[in-house]
Image (cartoon, grey):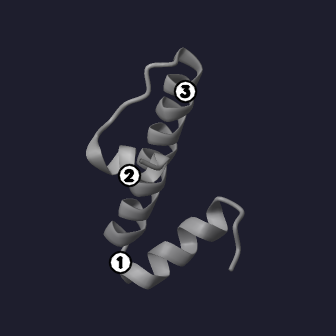
Amino acid sequence: MTGDEKAQAGVRPTDPEAAARYAEMLEGAASCFLLYQSFIEAGFTEGQAIQLVGVTLGGQR
């Protein structure tokens, strides 16, 4: 089972270092979602909001 498959199945890491990385990943995902949601609430389209999140976080595409 790959890491992605484990994440989709809700398997959480037991190794303390892996657990810390997992927590950081979840915090990052939550931050991205809240940023995206704020752009949607400001009246941007979904596509614009996704682009703005990318630009805001430094990953211009």
- Label 1: few (<14), some or many (≥20) within 10 Å? few
Q: Three-letter amino acid code at disc 3?
A: Ala
Q: Earlier in the sequence, mark 1 or mark 2?
A: 2
Q: Residue at x 48, y 82 (%)?
A: 48
Extreme-top residue of the structure: 16
- Residue corresponding to mark 2: 5
Q: Earlier in the sequence, mark 2 or mark 3?
A: 2
Question: In the rendering, at what x and y percent does residue 13 appear?
Answer: 44, 27
Q: For the residues labelled 2 and 3, say whether their Cβ atoms are less than 8 Å apart.
A: no
Q: For the residues labelled 3 and 1, say whether their Cβ atoms are less than 8 Å apart.
A: no
Q: Residue at x 39, y 61 (%)?
A: 38
Question: In the rendering, at what x and y percent does residue 21 appear?
Answer: 56, 31
Closest to the camera, between mark 3 and mark 1, is: 3
Q: Is residue 55 above or below residue 13?
A: below
Q: Residue at x 40, y 56 (%)?
A: 33
Question: In the rendering, at what x and y percent does residue 28 appear?
Answer: 52, 44
Q: Residue at x 48, y 46 (%)?
A: 3
Question: In the visual, does 37 lie left or right of 4?
Answer: left
Tag shown at residue 18: 3
Report helix, strand or loop for mark 2.
Answer: helix
**Which residue is nearer to you in this view: 46 or 39?**
46
Q: Earlier in the sequence, mark 3 or mark 1?
A: 3
Distance between mark 2 and mark 3 Cα atoms: 15 Å
Q: Is residue 29 above or below residue 36?
A: above
Report helix, strand or loop for mark 3.
Answer: helix
Q: Three-letter amino acid code at disc 2?
A: Glu
- Residue corresponding to mark 1: 43
Question: In the rendering, at what x and y percent does residue 55 appear?
Answer: 65, 69
The quarter of the rendered structure image containing the C terminus is: bottom right
Distance between mark 3 and mark 1 Cα atoms: 38 Å
